[in-house]
């Protein structure tokens, strides 16, 4: 694994070297923002901050794609991925998206130590039988970023296939990545079953968290494995106030900041003390 990656790139000419060393079709604007191309679609990144309650600051960003067709018609991510009907096309597109996210994040983020959260498509996890994360690791080596700075989000649908979940977590972890899994259901048996393969971060929807009947038991179980709880999709101050009464570790949602084509930092929670109590 690339635990001792070289110093990150900083100059525009290094982008040219990176492009020449890969098969990706990339473009860099004068402002430094990078996009890639898949068939007739241009793909770029937006980022949403991940806020640490304990450290009272942003510790990373979740990356999402934004895309448009040649005629400048905006496309939903599912529309882009629907173009990849074959496994080899899906693998190419998913890897391209992660490469674009990494380039935009570490080209345009003043902090080189924050974490980049990227999801992988569930079909890719089934199409690639072994060595999950190897191609992305090679790309990260090229741009001088450690795999430990990357949090791989495992889609919630994979929770239905425990053997696959176990397999991909083992693969990614062996290469130094951090792992984020999505909590689903109302029980925690799946967490106990994972044992030492338990993810570094568990993500749960804010609306699900505040309705959970045994939230203390859930958070205690997560923390007993040394993992962190990330509450995502925060939309209202009421949700935020409720979440702050739990032992959650990380927060994410439009209430804090919408996904933006910029690396934004959050220092103060937008909620008053009266709302918390």
Image (cartoon, helix red, strand yellow):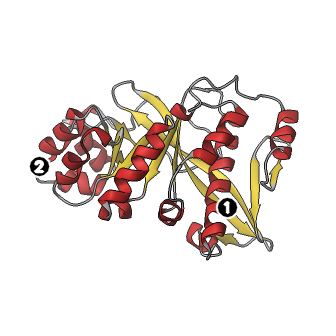
Q: Residue at x 79, y 48 (%)?
A: 22
CB atoms of marks 1 and 2 within 8 Å: no
* Mark 1 vs 2, N-terminal side: 1
Q: Residue at x 42, y 30 (%)?
A: 268
Q: Residues within 10 Å of mark 2 (few under 14, many from 20)?
A: few
- Looking at the rendered structure, the number of numbered marks drawn on it comes to 2
Where is 57 relative to 75, above or below?
Answer: above
The circle on residue 37 is: none
Q: Position of residue 35 (x, y in %)?
A: 75, 53
88 and 63: which is toward the camera: 88
Q: Position of residue 247 (x, y in %)?
A: 22, 35
Q: CA distance from mark 1 to mark 2?
A: 42 Å
Q: Is residue 33 visible?
A: yes
Q: Quadrant of the N terminus?
A: top right
102 and 20: which is toward the camera: 20
Specify whether 228 is left or right of 210: right
The circle on residue 214 is: 2
Q: Position of residue 271 (x, y in %)?
A: 34, 38
Residue linked to disc 1: 92
């Amino acid at each position: 694994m690339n635990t001792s990656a070289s110093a990150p790139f900083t100059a525009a000419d290094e982008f040219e070297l990176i492009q020449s060393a890969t098969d990706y079709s990339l473009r860099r604007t004068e402002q430094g923002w990078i996009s890639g191309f898949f068939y007739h679609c241009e793909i770029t990144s937006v980022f949403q901050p991940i806020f640490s309650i304990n450290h009272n600051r942003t510790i990373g960003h979740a990356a999402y794609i934004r895309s448009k067709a040649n005629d400048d018609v905006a496309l939903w991510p599912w529309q882009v991925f629907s173009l990849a009907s074959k496994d080899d096309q899906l693998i190419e597109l998913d890897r391209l998206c992660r490469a674009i996210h990494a380039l935009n994040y570490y080209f345009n983020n003043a902090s080189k130590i924050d974490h980049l959260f990227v999801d992988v498509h569930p079909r890719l996890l089934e199409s690639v039988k072994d060595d999950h994360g190897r191609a992305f690791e090679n790309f990260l080596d090229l741009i001088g970023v450690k795999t430990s700075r990357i949090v791989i989000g495992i889609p919630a649908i994979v929770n239905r296939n425990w053997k696959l979940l176990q397999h991909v977590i083992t693969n990614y972890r062996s290469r130094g990545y951090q792992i984020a899994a999505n909590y689903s259901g109302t029980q925690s048996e799946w967490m106990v079953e994972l044992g030492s393969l338990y993810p570094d971060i568990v993500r749960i929807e804010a609306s699900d968290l505040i309705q959970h009947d045994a939230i203390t038991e859930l958070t205690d179980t997560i923390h007993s494995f040394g993992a962190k709880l990330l509450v995502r999709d925060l939309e209202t101050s009421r949700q935020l106030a409720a979440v702050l009464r739990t032992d959650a570790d990380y927060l994410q949602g439009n209430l804090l900041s919408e996904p933006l084509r910029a690396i934004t930092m959050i220092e103060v929670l937008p909620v008053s003390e009266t709302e918390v109590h």
